[in-house]
């Protein structure tokens, strides 16, 4: 559902925040698909475990471990918006 929404209008989003474990695909798979549509969107990956492939992926702008406070998540999103990296 989220990928379909992004496909409809990728420029409606300033940042993507995604969990790594989702039904049907991983957060990294989602990020890779989103990058094909728009290379400059910052993507923040949230995970309860370390996924080294995702951490190294050029599709992921920043990552944060669960549990994270709202303040921590806000800081990571601000960092991602300030320093997006394109794949």
Image (cartoon, helix red, strand yellow):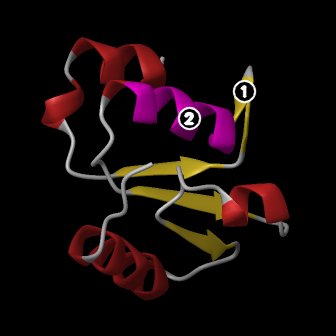
Q: Is residue 51 visible?
A: no
Where is residue 12? Give x, y as percent.
14, 33
The residue drawn where x is 40% and y is 87% is: 71
The residue drawn where x is 19% and y is 20% is: 9
Pointer 1: residues within 10 angstroms few (<14), some, or many (20+)? few
Among the 4 quarters of the image, the one containing residue 85? bottom left
Indicate whether residue 30 is drawn in magenta: yes
The residue drawn where x is 85% and y is 67% is: 49
Alpha carbon separation for disc pair 2 and 1: 11 Å
Q: Secondary structure at mark 1?
A: strand
Q: Which mark is residue 25?
A: 1
From the viewer's perspective, is the residue at label 2 or at label 1 nearer? 2
Please provide the residue range marked out in magenta: 27-36
Is residue 76 toward the left or the right of residue 29 in the image?
left
Q: Secondary structure at mark 2?
A: helix
Among the 4 quarters of the image, the one containing residue 77? bottom left
Q: Please, is residue 86 above or below residue 38 in the view?
A: below
Is residue 18 toward the left or the right of residue 2 in the image?
right
Q: Which mark is residue 60?
A: none
Q: Give the labeled residue for mark 2.
A: 32
Where is residue 57? Give x, y as percent.
64, 56
Indicate whether residue 31 is drawn in magenta: yes
User: Which of marks 1 and 2 precedes in the sequence?
Assistant: 1
Q: Please, is residue 45 above or below residue 5 in the view?
A: below
């Amino acid at each position: 559902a989220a990928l379909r929404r992004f496909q409809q209008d990728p420029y409606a989003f300033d940042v993507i925040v995604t969990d790594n474990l989702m039904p049907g695909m991983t957060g990294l798979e989602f990020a890779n698909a989103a990058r094909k549509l728009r290379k400059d969107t910052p993507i923040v990956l949230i995970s309860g475990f370390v996924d080294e492939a995702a951490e190294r992926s050029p599709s992921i702008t920043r990552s944060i471990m669960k549990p994270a406070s709202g303040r921590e998540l806000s800081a990571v999103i601000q960092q991602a918006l300030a320093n997006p990296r394109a794949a």
